[in-house]
Image (tube, rainbow, N blue to C red):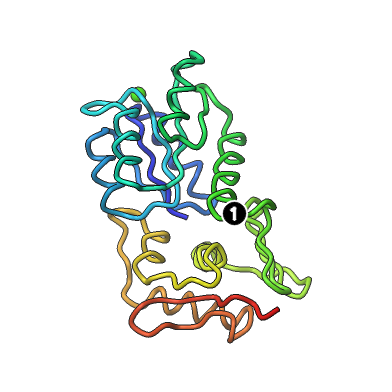
């Protein structure tokens, strides 16, 4: 899962980035509203964490523009503005959640998981696919009741594919969910992760769509 973090407070930005990455997120971090609007318009993110008081363009305007463009990425507003009017305005402008600073990291994480769930129309936190299950919170994967040990990026690939069962996930989308800006992408890294997943789970799980990406197909009833 790829998160865009928009926060101009350097200390908080750093704290958040280093706290979220171990939770299985790739975090890209921007400190100004104008850049954030460009990034959200041009690239795919699974979630956006948005501060309101930002240089160049305030968060509410960013959000308004994003929604006017029809971009539906879930947005969580993270702000110290705590009047009811602010909260109502944020949610009415198209935010999916609103969290006040100072906040607790465990609560932020739980809210991010809830947003992901809702965005994919799931009511349960676990993703279950046949005898395979993935728990985004504990970052555990079970196959036929046995825990399967996956490396961080293997987990991220599987998570992304399982969130989009029945849909092709493009190479680009997978790579973007694995690597933040400025991280080097080795040309065959994705193939290697897929290879390992097929080996650790089962070969037919992930289908290659040549020249496009990968898919976990809808299960036959
Ligand atoms: Ca701020």
Q: Residue 89, how many percent across, how many down?
A: 43, 23
Q: With respect to residue 79, does 192 lie above or below?
A: below
Give whichever of 20, 51 is nearer the camera. 51
- Compared across the picture, whether 99 is left or right of 35 comes to right
84 shown above or below 164: above
- Residue 91 image point, x, y percent: 47, 29
The quarter of the image that holds ligand 1 is top left
- Could you say which quadrant of the image residue 80 lies in? top left
Count of marks overlaid on the render:
1
Residue at x-position 35% and y-position 35%: 63
Give the x, y percent position of residue 26. Answer: 43, 53
The relative height of residue 184 versus residue 68 in the rendered view (above or below) is: below
Q: Nearer the viewer, residue 4 or 216?
A: 216
Q: Is residue 191 left or right of residue 206?
A: left
- Residue 186: give x, y in percent of width and height: 33, 71
Q: In the image, is 136 to the left or to the right of 208?
A: right
> For the residue with label 1, is its CB less than 8 Å from the closest atom of ligand 1?
no
User: Based on the displayed image, in which of its 4 quarters is residue 108 positioned?
Assistant: top right
Which residue appears at 29% of the width and 37% of the height? 65
**At x 34% / y 47%, what residue is drawn?**
70
Given residues 211 and 155, the one toward you in this image is 211
In this picture, is 88 found above or below 221? Answer: above
Of all residues, the one furthest to the right in this rendering is 145
Q: Secondary structure at mark 1?
A: loop
* Residue that mark 1 sits on: 121
Q: Residues within 10 Å of mark 1 (few under 14, many from 20)?
A: few
Between residue 7 and residue 22, name the one nearer to us.
Answer: 7
């Amino acid at each position: 899962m790829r998160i865009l973090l928009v926060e101009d407070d350097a200390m908080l930005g750093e704290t958040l980035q280093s706290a979220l990455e171990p939770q299985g997120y790739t975090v890209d971090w921007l400190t100004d509203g104008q850049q954030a609007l460009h990034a959200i318009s041009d690239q795919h993110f699974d979630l956006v964490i948005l501060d309101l008081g930002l240089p160049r363009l305030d968060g509410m305007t960013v959000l308004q523009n994003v929604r006017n463009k029809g971009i539906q990425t879930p947005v969580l507003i993270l702000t110290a503005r705590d009047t009811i009017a602010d909260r109502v305005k944020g949610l009415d402008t198209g935010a999916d959640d609103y969290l006040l600073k100072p906040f607790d990291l465990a609560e932020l994480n739980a809210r991010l998981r809830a947003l992901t769930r809702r965005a994919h129309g799931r009511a349960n936190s676990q993703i279950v696919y046949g005898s395979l299950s993935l728990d985004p919170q504990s970052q555990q994967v079970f196959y036929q009741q046995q825990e399967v040990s996956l490396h961080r990026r293997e987990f991220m690939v599987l998570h992304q594919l399982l969130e989009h069962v029945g849909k092709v996930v493009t190479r680009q989308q997978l790579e973007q969910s694995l690597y933040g800006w400025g991280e080097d992408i080795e040309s065959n890294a994705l193939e290697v992760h897929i290879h390992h997943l097929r080996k650790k789970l089962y070969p037919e799980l992930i289908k290659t769509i040549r020249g496009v990406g990968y898919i976990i197909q809808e299960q036959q009833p």
